[in-house]
Amino acid sequence: LNAIIAGSELMSEISGMTEEHRELNSMVVRSAHNLLSLVSDVLDFSKIEAERLELESRPFVLASCIDLSFEMQSLKANHKELSLNYYISKEVPRRLLGDEMRLRQIVTNLISNAVKFTDHGSVELRVRVLKTDQESASEVLHDPDVQRVSLDEQIYGGYMAAAKEVTK
């Protein structure tokens, strides 16, 4: 992975690349970094089992986190002629404090599964504030009030794969 990252970063310095090639190379670099993070998480699995996993608590921009997840799935979605969209409610703060890498992994898995199980239409992610109080706000990545899915196939607990004729 480090060789892929290094080689891709070196490629970005080559003059004469088209804009499309630069964008694709940039996606390879970001995806390789994300894959490296995933490998690190797999290696940290023992920490999870031992209940010693520590989450990061750093500021990050939610839209940037989601953008990267969507970008990594865009080639698969384009191949299936699916549109990818996300909406962030105005009530959700632009910058959040938390573990961006783990949130991106969750979003990437959700979007990847949605693309995998959707044959036509679009895949949408809606982020809204679920609950607020004076000290904190809890954001959700799935709106349980939206009934767009059938209960044919379960993916993750409350997240379901829609029937082929249903858009997620």
Image: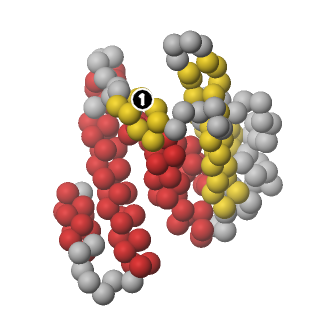
Give the left or right position of residue 99, taking residue 131 as reference. Answer: left
Q: Quadrant of the N terminus?
A: bottom left
- In the rendered view, does 101 fall on the left or right side of 167? left
- Circle 1 sits on which residue? 97
Q: Is residue 159 visible?
A: no
Q: Tell me which corner region of the image, top left, top right, bottom left or bottom right, holds residue 148.
A: top right
User: What amino acid type should be assigned to the residue bearing mark 1?
Assistant: Leu
Residue at horizontal 45 percent and vertical 41 percent from the top: 61
The answer to whether 105 is drawn above or below residue 67 in the figure is above
Query: Tag 1: Cα neighbours inside 10 Å, few (<14), some, or many (≥20)?
Result: few
Question: Residue drawn at (32%, 38%), measured in percent from left and top?
Answer: 42
From this viewpoint, which residue is outermost toward the top? 134
Residue shown at the point (39%, 64%) measured from the top left = 27
Residue 158, position as x, y percentages in the image: 65, 29
Residue 34 is situated, as x and y percent measured from the top left of the image, at 35, 50
Residue 63 place in picture, x, y as percent: 51, 46
Left or right for 106, reference 148: left
Q: Is residue 78 placed above or below 37 in the rendered structure?
A: below
